[in-house]
Amino acid sequence: MLGKRRTLASQLIEEIKKRILDGDLAPGDKLPSEQSLINQYGVSRTVVREAIAGLRADGMVVTRQGVGAFVTDNPMNKLDIFNPRTLKDILHVLDLRLCLEAKTAELAAQNRSEEQLAKIANSLEEFKKAGMDYNEISAADFQFHMAIAEASGNPYFLKLLEHLGPQIIPHSRIDLYQLPDDEVDFLGKVYFEHEAIYRHIENKDSAMAGSAMSGHLEKGIARYKKLDAESSN
């Protein structure tokens, strides 16, 4: 059974990575099935799927439709790529995302289909339904940004976000810091920022969609700079 302080997906990723490093899972080996991982670690199917996505993004596993996930030939080469370990790491990733995702949102507003818009809306609803469950919040948050990348029409935006993985979402790494005292208000603000981005994409207003995404990420940068300053005192 996994603990509660870190998100369950990040803990499961580390557990599977350790098994690979220890040689329990060798290159070419198939990972245990979703149901086996659910039973072994006492987590939900959502957590297992987020963990597999993170391992795939790190280049440690490949997935085969309808077959399962397999350890890659050279899993050690990408173990620590985009694995933010400090608040400063998170800030560097947010800077990268600011450059990338403002344009992604602009293109999504121009190019999105109704089906893609529905995916963005669904991830927004999942975020709202998650309440204070950080595992579900971080998964829904990542899917929101992935859905926008898909709607951009540029497959390389989507590939890059997939490669960066779920750990680019700051509150997926709550083991690194304490959220502000007003946690509910903090997450509520994030939700309304997401909702504003969605509305501009829905209205096909590319300039406002890009601006709303920039504002969302800039506010995130400001939040974590404040936390970083407080943790240094």
Image (cartoon, rainbow, N blue to C red):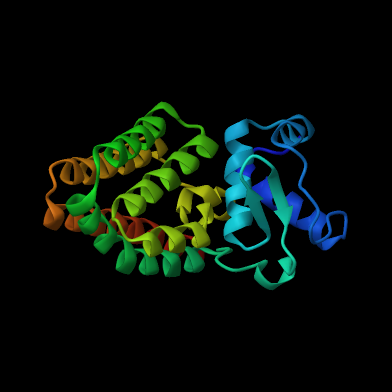
Name the side, left or right, on which 193 lies relative to 15.
left
Picture coordinates of residue 36 (x, y %)?
77, 33
Q: Which residue is pictured at 61% across the width and 62% down the height? A: 58
Q: Nearer the viewer, residue 197 or 34?
A: 34
- Place residue 9 in its image quadrant: top right
- Place residue 185 in its image quadrant: top left
- Place residue 38 in its image quadrant: top right
Q: Which residue is pictured at 37% across the width and 62% down the height? A: 157
Relative to 190, residue 105 above or below:
below
- As drawn, which residue projects farthest toward the bottom? 77
Q: How many marks?
A: 0
Placement of the N terminus among the 4 image quadrants: top right
Whether residue 190 appears in this view of the structure is: yes
Name the side, left or right, on which 157 lies relative to 134.
left
Q: Nearer the viewer, residue 5 or 192?
A: 192
Q: Which residue is pictured at 27% across the width and 53% down the height? A: 216
Q: Nearer the viewer, residue 95 or 204?
A: 204
Picture coordinates of residue 91 (x, y %)?
42, 66
Picture coordinates of residue 49 (x, y %)?
60, 41
Q: Nearer the viewer, residue 178 or 169?
A: 169
Name the side, left or right, on which 224 lies relative to 204.
right
Picture coordinates of residue 117 (x, y %)?
27, 39
Relative to 190, residue 20 above or below:
below
Whether residue 5 appears in this view of the structure is: no
Relative to 161, residue 2 above or below:
above
